[in-house]
Amino acid sequence: MTTSPSRINLPAVAMVSAWTGVLVVLSFWMSRQAYHWLPVQASTAAPLVDGLFSFETALATFVFCGVVSVMAWVVLFNRAAKYDMSDAEPIEGNTRLEIIWTVIPALVVFGIAFYAVRVNQQLAILGPMEHIHRGNPIEQVGGYAGDRLPPEAVEVIARQWSWEFRYPKAQVSSTELHLPVNEPVTFRLVSEDVIHGFYVPAFRLKQDVIPGRAIDFKLTPTREGRYRLRDSMYSGTWFAANQADVVVESADSFQAWLKQGASQPLQPGLSDAVQEYDERQQAGAKGWATVRPAPRPQVNFPGSNTLPHDA
Amino acid sequence: MTTSAPFDPRILKSNAPVPGAPDNWKRFFSFNTDAKVIGIQYISVAIFFLLVGGLLAMIMRGELITPENDLVDRTVYNGLYTMHGTIMLFMFIFPVLNGLNNLLIPPMIGAPDMAFPRLNAVAFWMVPLFGVILMASFLLPGGPANAGWWSYPPVSTQNPLGHLISGESMWLLAVALSGVSSIIGALNFVTTIIRMRAPGMTFFRMPVFIWTVWAAQTLQLIGLPALTGGAIMLLFDLVVGTSFFQPEGGGDPVLYQHFFWFYSHPAVYVIILPVFGIFSELFSVHSRKPLFGYAFVAVASFVIVFLGLIVWVHHFFPSGVPEWMRNLFMVTTMLISVPTGVKVFAWLATIWGGKIQLNTPMLFCLGGLFNFVFAGVTGIMLATVPIDIHVNNTYFVVGHFHYVIYGAAVMGIFAAIYHWFSKFTGRMYYEGLGKLHFALTFIGSNLNFFPMHPLGLMGMPRRVSSYDPEFTFWNVVASLGSFLLGVSIIPFLLNMISSWVRGPKAPQNPWQAIGLEWLLPSPPPAENFEDNVPTVISGPYGYGTGKPLVENQAAYENQQFQEV
């Protein structure tokens, strides 16, 4: 990116240095801006991910603007006259320069990787804890989970197209996910049909839910509020409508919610897909073939997915 | 012609000359074995499907201009986005690149044709065949495939109507046929490059475009059997009831993801490598300077091939892959930026201090490089596991790969079409329309694809037919950009058709470029150099060095003067 180092040209060096300084400042400013492009931070993972993203935004800004600066310079100042087809000075290469621009990016990449591996270790993202090999996996993981889970864990059942959350200890089920703030929570993720994705942008976490496997997944919410849980793995016709709300609240409100839930009888939970499917059938089922949505889950607490959410 | 080699396909070729004079337009509609005819056939079919795929995209952007699902039924939207991806990849970008390969490889290396001309024609004619299969699937009662171009099971093997002939089964058939066609093509290209170069054209005198095609087609040969095999296994799951990927029968749906991405990640390099080759050729010619660090740039292609084969898991980091695998594939993915960076820096050093002509091909190259570097920096973010966990399967990924595929690759392909248009049609294109096409494409693609990044960061999943209202603003911008991009193709089509029909006659070498193809008349005769294959005596980018490319260079240059 710099000129050939054979003869030192002071004004050029000064100009390149000054411009590099401008780019460094710009990159730093962009790394601060980067936080505003992301949803609110609502889990312990979020600041780690955002820090890494901010850092890479700075690097990205520097590299992108550096390259574009060179291109802009060339386009502005290295233009040939309209019918000038003569050749420019034939510089065929510079081995030292080529080695430099191989080695430095390699070092930068290893630096990023090192940082990212450390963040990876800090994040409590667990891989699949167990494979279910025999029997009918749907039956094994689909039933009430109370006796298979640690009592604090929350069972998440993904279906085409609804989410159901079960709290084994309190014997409560819901189509709205409630979590106490600042307490680690373990989910057991299961799917009854296809692959779904458990994705809460405010938590910066995502885990595919694979049929035939029960996946343990841990996180700690850190901010009270109402967030969206979105299916992140394409799951068929009503994939886009397969969303649920996540309510992070104080331990007291959470306990009160559990208590209230336990006192309520089972009732049909939320499923936008079921509602849209019924309307679609009444309207003559125009469009192409679709799988029929799973019936609304029977839950103690349907909740809502139309209230304003923080992210 | 030299006859000293024990095996010289050129002898076979000359003994069975291709019928059809350059003026016989009917040859474009026949089973013709001339690579220059096949090249134009590929490109024409591909551009037809670019229009089809683009139309589907504009309907999708019409749906996404509002948060609610209100333009098309959700089933229709899912079919549209699936077929958009499928058509753009299998019916547009691979065929258009194979078209460029067919046009450019033989003249650039001084060969009369491809090594296996009949196989070459077979590989091409499979494209309209599976194109018809794909298009026919729109007419099925259940509609076309709607599980995305990844076609992940189990969602892809759900067959609501239970018919044997479903959109999905036709899709899988088409993809398997496309795989066979591409494998045949790859064999042909690799053999041609290795065996049929002009005397004196050592590997390190080959143009970089030839290097990159060689690298890309080697990737096809290694990777495609995995995808084709995976597609056939999935077809068995769907129609015969096997359970390779069905959890109920002890299969593993994640296994399919490995098969799929083992090929489909390298597929990105199959697309972008030849475009790197185009950039390398064009930056050099239109800056009137040698390509900076030719040997580094050439060899970097094969480093990318090697690394490109060991990164596939980065497509499904959240699929339940173990921590060590996440870290390993993160590092390999990031390492690809090193050989890629070598190329980018070499292009910058090439144009640096050059005598830049801002004609249409050069503008497309500069715009393509701009977009590519943007895609590169977002690519590093995506490689980083913790960031990827957040943005995987969101619009951030969609934005990233559209910058790569449309912003960089397709712009590079347009650059190549303009740059070599005169060589193969014998006519010049209209510069004004070309520049208009560039401006609309550059603005349209950035307007369309940039907004996808903030959307992804905010957490908007890809493939949705409706979304929460907070995503509206950027979606409206993206939709407007997509409509502009749709308009941008009009000056291109006008230019191509009108220039070919009545454009000014092209000289032999309008860019005063160095390269064997520019020593041929425009358009070249059926067998290129026929019996007068030149002997290459220097490297491919001798701008300003005064070194002739071939023995007796003046004779080849004068040949044309005598004809005109």
Image: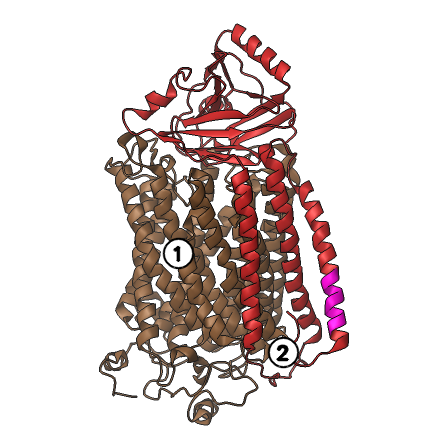
Chain colours: A red, B brown
Identify the residue shown where x is 58% and y is 73%.
Answer: A97
Distance from label 2 to label 1 (Cα)? 36 Å
Quadrant in the rendering for residue B349:
bottom right
Q: Which residue position holds label 2? A: B354
Look at the picture and state if A165 lies above or below B509: above
- The region drawn magenta spans A13-21
Q: Please give the name of the residue rendered at 43% of the width and 38% of the height, measured from the top-left corner.
A: B319
- Three-letter amino acid code of the residue under disc 1: Leu
Task: Determine the main secondary structure of the stretch shown in magenta.
Answer: helix
Circle 1 packing at 10 Å, graded few (<14), some (14-19), many (20+), is many
**Do circles 2 and 1 both sit on a common chain?**
yes
Is B477 left, or right, of B81 in this rendering? right
Is residue B33 toward the left or the right of residue B68 in the image? left
Which dot marks residue B309? 1
Q: Nearer the viewer, residue A78 or B23?
A: A78
Q: Which percent across, then down, holds residue B203?
A: 39, 77
Amino acid on which disc 2 is placed: Gly
Q: Is residue A41 left or right of residue A209?
A: right
In magenta segment, residue A148:
no
Helix, strand or loop at label 1? It is loop
B79 and A243: which one is in front? Answer: A243
